[in-house]
Image: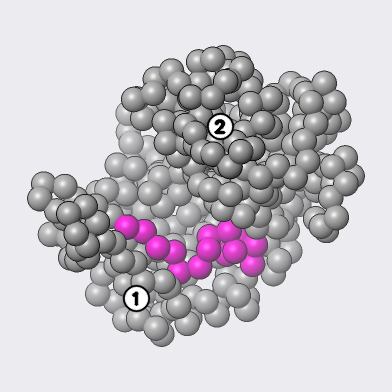
């Protein structure tokens, strides 16, 4: 069962903010179209109102950095059986799409920019050679009934079907509008369920649902010694660099890698990402101080402090094991990626990291 979302205003007393319906059914779709990151920052929207070969219409179609597709269906007035059956029907068609068809869908959605350019702009890499080898289904709604919840939970947990639901609650106060988001199932658990149930396709490796690669580009904005001393990783100086840090949730395990140097640490995420101006370090005395008020080797970490697009973003980490950059682990064939954070599923890399850091947990 999904969690109930409640928001209270606490300035000048305690007042619960009441959720309401959006003025139009299309408003949420427009919000997602402007920024699909409210569902997943690792997605590129490639189509809206996409016609299938069977005359049906998919609300939204998106792709991630490894070429997997995501079907997004906004629930309006369908019965529980209808909405689940509808999105599965869409998936049966989506799985047949090849590269040219996907590029054609994107050209309809955005005729000005070629698919390849949009993909590169989003992920800083060309589309992979193998595309659309997996897909995910997401039902978007303000709420769904218990029958629909049970069906989705059953399909995911018992059969590894990559299906989930996300709820958006809307409220308005004066001239300001807000959305609150809740997932029915942890999206990482859905992927882990699918990986465990399905036989991986050639070249694919399942993800265990909690391990992440973090690229720590050292320079004037961040320094590995600062990260060790104060317990964090960071990225910034552009939304492309900082957005993927949103993938790191509390409890995720990360492996920090300095580009062209190697892997230098393993730790557990303690708090989600925040702008650098909001991050406080915990000193040995127990005192908390803003990170920009403590001695840092990365002297420009506070640059662009008030610019949400360019400032540094920080994730609190409890380091389990670290090594100086001079002792970093790197072997030919180990995983590396341009993203600041991404899922780590490469078996060879995980085995080498387990041995190097003497991890007791089975990978």
In the rendered image, which quarter contains the N terminus? bottom left
- Vertical side of 16 occupied by 121: above or below: above
Q: Nearer the viewer, mark 1 or mark 2?
A: 2
Q: Which residue is mark 1?
A: 144
Q: CA distance from mark 1 to mark 2?
A: 37 Å
- The numbered mark at residue 326 is none
Q: Is residue 269 visible?
A: yes
Compared across the picture, whether 157 is left or right of 119 comes to: right
Q: Residue furthest bottom?
A: 147
Q: Is residue 148 left or right of residue 262?
A: left
Extreme residue toward the left, this view: 174
* Total numbered labels placed on residues in the image: 2
The quadrant the C terminus occupies is bottom right
Q: Which mark is residue 234?
A: 2
- On the image, the x and y values in percent for residue 130 come to 64, 43
First in sequence, mark 1 or 2: give its number.
Answer: 1
Which residue does the image show at 40% across and 63% down from the upper left? Answer: 182
Q: Is residue 291 above or below residue 173?
A: above
Asked where in the image residue 309 lies, by quadrant, the reply is top left
Residue occupying image coordinates x 31% and y 66%: 6
| Lateral position of residue 312 relative to residue 160, left or right | left
Q: Based on the displayed image, in which of its 4 quarters is residue 179 positioned?
A: bottom left
Residue bounds of the magenta highlight:
180-193
The local secondary structure at tag 2 comes to strand
Depth check, front residue: 68 or 18:
18
308 and 29: which one is in front?
A: 308
């Amino acid at each position: 069962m999904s969690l109930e979302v409640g928001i209270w205003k606490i300035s000048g007393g305690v007042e619960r903010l009441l959720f309401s319906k959006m003025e139009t059914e299309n408003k949420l779709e427009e919000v997602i179209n402007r920024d699909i990151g409210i569902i997943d920052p690792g997605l590129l929207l490639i189509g809206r109102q996409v016609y299938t070969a069977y005359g049906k219409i998919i609300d939204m179609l998106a792709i991630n950095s490894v070429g997997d597709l995501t079907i997004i269906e906004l629930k309006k007035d369908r019965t529980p059986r209808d909405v689940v059956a509808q999105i599965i029907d869409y998936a049966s068609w989506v799985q047949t799409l090849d590269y040219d068809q996907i590029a054609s869908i994107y050209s309809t959605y955005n005729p000005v920019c070629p698919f390849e350019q949009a993909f590169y702009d989003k992920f800083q890499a060309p589309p992979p050679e193998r595309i659309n080898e997996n897909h995910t289904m997401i039902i978007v709604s303000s709420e769904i009934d218990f029958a629909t919840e049970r069906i989705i939970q059953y399909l995911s947990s018992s059969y590894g079907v990559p299906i989930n639901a996300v709820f958006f609650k809307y409220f308005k106060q004066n001239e300001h509008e807000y959305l609150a988001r809740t997932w029915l199932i942890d999206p990482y658990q859905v992927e882990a369920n699918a990986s465990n149930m399905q036989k991986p396709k050639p070249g694919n490796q399942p993800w265990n649902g909690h391990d992440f690669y973090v690229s720590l580009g050292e320079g004037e904005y961040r320094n590995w010694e600062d990260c060790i001393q104060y317990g964090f990783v960071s990225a910034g100086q552009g939304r492309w660099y900082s957005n993927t840090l949103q993938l790191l949730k509390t409890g995720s395990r990360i492996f920090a890698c300095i580009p062209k140097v190697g892997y230098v640490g393993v730790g557990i995420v303690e708090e989600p990402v925040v702008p650098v101006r909001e991050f406080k370090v915990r000193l040995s005395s127990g005192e908390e101080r803003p990170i920009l008020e403590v001695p840092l080797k990365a002297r420009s970490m506070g640059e662009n402090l008030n610019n949400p697009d360019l400032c540094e973003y920080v994730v609190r980490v409890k380091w389990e094991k670290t090594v100086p950059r001079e002792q970093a682990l790197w072997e030919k064939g180990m995983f590396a990626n341009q993203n600041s954070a991404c899922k780590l599923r490469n078996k060879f890399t995980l085995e080498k990291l387990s041995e190097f850091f003497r991890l007791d947990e089975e990978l």
